[in-house]
Image: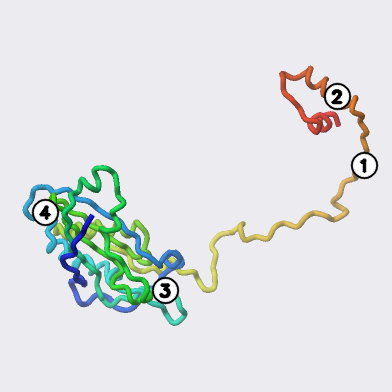
Amino acid sequence: MEISIKESTIVRPAEEHTPKGSIWNSNLDIPLSGYHVYTVYFYEPNGCSDFFDTGRVKEGLSKVLVPFYPIAGRLGYDENGRLKIICKDEGVLFVEAETSSVLEDLIGNGDFTHNSHLVPKVDYSGGISSYPLLVVQQVTKFKCGGVCLGVGFQHALGDGTLAIHFINSWVDTARGVSPAIAPFIDRTLLRARVPPTPKFHHLEYEPSPPLKAAESDLKPSTVSTFKLTVDQLNALKAKAAANSSGTKYSSYNILAAHI
């Protein structure tokens, strides 16, 4: 499938006075922060002349970046080398493309191997602060009139729940509706307290109980040796077989039961 890139633009928040500075990342945000997570959405044409109007989509993206301002930021490190999100309205990449293929070529036969062509590539070689974006958007228009929206969400921004929240809020904004739920930006609620102040007992951190080896705790024991011949063992097996319903017992089972 051949895709022709028509235009690439940087979309910034619609308002200049979004909060600046940096956002602290919790231990839940850092481990999987080295890549983008991609999702691809397909839309069949609905017959309307303004179906998936690119200008409206870009305008909605610019507006929704105001409450979701960290998405327009970049990654960086603080003085301790900890990953953070730097908020300075650098914007996100919006790519417009088209293809001579039709949607049926992709979704009709269940072959999604071409999905990688429907999202922009991110160059990670220049370090985390060189990414042209934290969220990647690509709108590909098909010959049949259908549209594909490819989204790359930098994992340091959040998990799949946040990604869907952002997409839904973007859709609402493009339709002229206020997002139903505002994003919660402050991640310091997940910060460990210094010093630690546990509120309940943690059994998993308790030391293992010592083995009770004191002589006063030991009960008197007797050592005995049992000597059985092969004939005696066979006799025990025969007796057990006669009283069972076909169950076979090992020599160990027979001796343990006898003792």
Residue position for label 1: 223
N-terminal label among 1 and 2: 1
Q: Residues within 10 Å of mark 2 (few under 14, many from 20)?
A: few
Q: Mark 4–mark 2 contact, CB under 8 Å?
A: no
Q: What's the amino acid at mark 3? A: Leu
Residue position for label 4: 51
Q: Separation of disc 3 and disc 4 at Cα?
A: 40 Å
Q: Secondary structure at mark 4?
A: loop
N-terminal label among 3 and 4: 4
N-terminal label among 3 and 1: 3
**Spot occupied by residue 228 in the image (x, y as percentages of width and height):** 91, 30
Camera-near label (3 vs 1) is: 3
Camera-near label (1 vs 2) is: 2
Q: Is residue 69 left or right of residue 4?
A: right
Q: Separation of disc 4 and disc 2 at Cα?
A: 87 Å
Camera-near label (4 vs 1) is: 4
Residue situated in front as seen by the camera: 54 or 96: 96
Q: Residue at x 39, y 74 (%)?
A: 84
Q: Mark 2–mark 3 contact, CB under 8 Å?
A: no
Q: Residue at x 26, y 75 (%)?
A: 90
Q: Is residue 1 left or right of residue 127?
A: left
Say the numbered circle drawn on residue 159.
none
Height in image: 108 above or below 167? above
Say the numbered circle drawn on residue 83.
3
Q: Separation of disc 4 and disc 1 at Cα?
A: 90 Å
Camera-near label (3 vs 4) is: 4
